[in-house]
Amino acid sequence: MTQKRKMLFIIFFVIGTGCLLALLWKQDRILQRMNVQTARSIAQFGFAGSDTVAYYDRQELDIKEKWAVKAAPVLAYLSGEQDGIEPRKDKDTSRFAMLYPGKNTGKGIWSGAAGHWYRGTVFLAEENMQRAGEGSEQSDNMTEDVQEASAEVDADAAVLDKALQENQKYRQSEKKEQKQETLIAGGGEDNDKKIQHLQRTMSLNYLLRNFYIVDSSTSVNKKIFDVEALLNTEFSMKKKNQPQIYIFHTHGASEHFADSKPGDRSQSIVGVGTYLSEILEKKYGYQVIHDETEYDRINGKIDRNKAYNKAAKGLKKTLKKYPSIQVVIDLHRDGVGNNVHRLTKVNGKKTAQIMFFNGLSRNRKGDIRYLRNDNLQANLAFSLQMKLKCMELYPNLAKPVYLKSYRYNLHMRKRSLLIELGNENNTLSEAKNAMDPLAKVLDQVLSQD
């Protein structure tokens, strides 16, 4: 090789190496920036979702989304710097953040299915409120996510807008109540008026604003929420000398209360399920099967992501063995990751509030095909009628029904309930005090003509 050729080779080698290093440096900078943005978004909004793995495996993500999902999880989980982090409105980071299961890393507490009251939907609600207040200019510039969500409400986008604005007000009041104990009392007459107004008007808008919290991961429309059908679906059943009610706990190993003794199952959500079973059997005459399996304990470790898949197998096996079962209850303890201690009083006793929860098998873009639920309408009617009966008998026992995107094993029976009982700041006695009124409400819904 001549001297001239050697020099050209060296020059091209240096230039090529420099270009390669520059490209690698640029890629590393982009990756770091995406990690930081995604981690901040997750830390701010606290998205929860035990079906994240299934979502990631089956959703049709574009190249950019797939890259971000694979790049960011480590920092996302390690990010605990919630204080002082400004919320991001970037549509991409908000979309990426929704793919991750939520964890309050500062407190070390896994979020429940609906643990983050204001964080989970603040992005969508704020954008809707800004659009309503700033006119057409904001509408032209609003994010693709909000456009998709608004489009899901048929031709009347105002229905969802008003509902989300009302939900936002509710969360703002929730956020302000950062007290160790907040006792909720009164409200009976107001509840009666709300129920009567709903029955008289059959208004979808009124239903959404007053009886539901809509998570930003899902969307609603008139096809799903037929108010008349929700109110009038018949759930009465005759008591038989066969198992009719099945109670289990998808997160039985990981959900305890403020004063629970570590490792004592009787002082966990499982123990509260045992107490509910006893009341339903001894006081109301139902035949109940209580499944104490810790479905979130997999290979000796807590794994909440796989718990629903494992619980589905147990549920199918039980329903096949006992086809007489008509009512399925998945009893949870919510996790909020803050100091809110929500109580009401029932018969003079401090009582943890409950919250009924529905998965809609639907995201913002529409139905999730692989999560088919032929019992969805009945599930929604059952939880709403339970909520209304709570409002009638125990005005502040039940929070608004929470709506989210996935299915949560509610599809196997029409009378299926997922119940969030209190949170990690409630005591065991407060949780147990909610079981007697809950059992009475259930009996009345199942006994009504």
Image: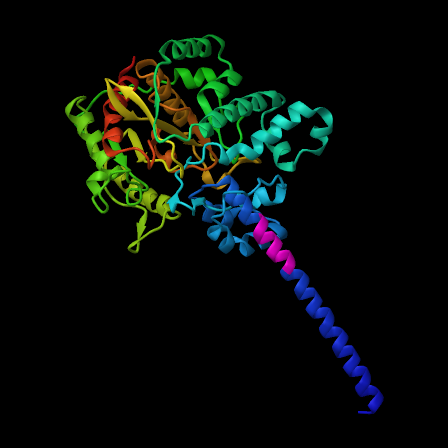
Q: What sort of colour scheme is used for the picture?
A: rainbow
Which residue is at the far left? 282
Judge whether 75 appears above or below 397 on screen: below
The image quarter in which residue 434 lies: top left
The total of numbered circles placed on residues is: 0
Does residue 370 appear left or right of residue 322 in this picture? right
Does residue 249 appear left or right of residue 264 in this picture? right
Give the quarter of the figure containing the C terminus.
Answer: top left
Judge whether 448 appears above or below 53 on screen: above
Residue 207 or residue 188, whichever sits in front: 188
Judge whether 123 appears above or below 201 on screen: below
Give the quarter of the figure containing the N terminus.
Answer: bottom right
Which residue is at the far bottom? 2
Residue depicted at 57% across the width and 21% down the height? 162
Residue 303 or residue 375, whichever sits in front: 303
Image spot of residue 351 (x, y percent): 28, 25
Does residue 11 appear left or right of residue 139 in this picture? right
Q: Is residue 34 magenta?
A: yes
Residue depicted at 58% across the width and 36% down the height? 365
Numbered range of the magenta stretch = 29-37
Q: Is residue 161 visible?
A: yes
Image spot of residue 115 (x, y percent): 41, 36
Image spot of residue 427 (x, y percent): 26, 33
Q: Is residue 14 magenta?
A: no
- State whether the magenta stretch is mostly helix, strand or loop: helix
The image quarter in which residue 143 lies: top right
Which residue is at the far right? 4
Q: Is residue 324 visible?
A: no
Image spot of residue 403 (x, y percent): 45, 30
Residue depicted at 46% across the width and 30% down the height? 175
Judge whether 190 appears above or below 306 on screen: above
Residue 349 or residue 273, whichever sits in front: 349
